[in-house]
Amino acid sequence: MKQRTITSLFLIFLILPIIYKGGLLFHLFVYALSIFALKEIITIKETKKAIPDLIKFISYIVMTLFVLYHSSQMKQFVLDYKIIAATFLLFLLSVMFYHDEEKYSVSDALYLVGTIFFIGISFSLLQIINSIHVNYVIYIFLIACITDSYSYLIGNLIGKHPVMESIDSFKKWEGLIGGVFFGTLLPYVFLSTVVHPNSSQIILFLMTLFLSVLGQFGDLFFSAMKKYFNKERFSNLMPGHGGVLDRFDSIIFITLGFIFFIGGIL
């Protein structure tokens, strides 16, 4: 618990200035997150089957193009179809090149394509949201951090009923409900007073509630992934927390959910 708290405080003092500074510093920060996340995706996959070095190299190149290129498309929710086409062609045609399922198969190719799109789009969206308004990124981080923290604390203190024991025996209904309660209330207060004081308060509250619940499902999704590969954590990059995908699992899902609102009610 002590190590987890120290790491959390360090991350807060590191990330907040980067978010506020924005610009190139924020783009590089998000790019670094995407590369570390991809490394964790590849590493956990290799617990079951090794991925050829050439394919791993291509993966990092594609992720770099994906995240850094779209960081230039500020305030635009667009995708470059050239990058999309190149991604599919590079990974799928490589199956023919290796022509050996023991080395590289169709399922390996689809795993990499899917995860690169999943991670790449999520972190690209985070950059676009930051360029629209820095407070939106703070709002997303507030939901994720408060929901996760209270879910963890309340679950440890009074949790007795597992949410999905087959996926994560540590996540309890008591913790989930408590996490969603505080993860909705506090970010809603921030959004309704600092960012959108004149907007419909009911809509802002319901949106925050939805995103807090979505963040919990993001946590469960990545827990299911770790369960499949029989790993406790994606990596040990952050002591007490694990890797990027252990710490940013909720943020990834909340970011994907937030874009349904940012172009409409906000």
Image (cartoon, rainbow, N blue to C red):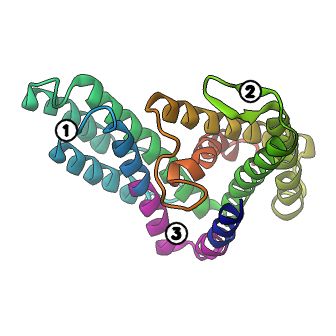
Of the two numbered discs 1 and 2 on the same chain, state the one appearing first in sequence: 1
Badge 3 is on which residue?
A: 26
User: Which quadrant of the view contains residue 47?
Assistant: top left
Gap in angstroms between the C-alphas marked 3 and 1: 29 Å
Mark nearest the camera among 1 and 2 is: 2
Q: Amino acid at mark 3?
A: Phe
**Residue at disc 2, secondary structure:** strand
Q: Is residue 123 visible?
A: yes
Q: Is residue 197 left or right of residue 237?
A: right
Q: Amino acid at mark 2?
A: Val
Query: Which region shows up in magenta?
Result: 13-35
Of the two numbered discs 3 and 1 on the same chain, state the one appearing first in sequence: 3
Identify which residue, 252 or 244, lies in the foreground: 244
Q: Amino acid at mark 1?
A: Leu
Q: Is residue 260 above or below residue 147?
A: above
Badge 1 is on which residue?
A: 90
**Residue 216 sits inside the magenta stretch:** no
User: Which quadrant of the view contains residue 73?
Assistant: bottom left
Q: Mark 1 packing: few (<14 Cα in 10 Å), some, or many (20+)? A: some
Q: Is residue 55 left or right of residue 126?
A: left
Of the two numbered discs 3 and 2 on the same chain, state the one appearing first in sequence: 3
Q: Residue at x 86, y 48 (%)?
A: 182
Q: Is residue 222 left or right of residue 160?
A: left
Gap in angstroms between the C-alphas marked 1 and 2: 40 Å
Q: Which mark is residue 163?
A: 2
Q: Position of residue 26 (x, y in %)?
A: 52, 69
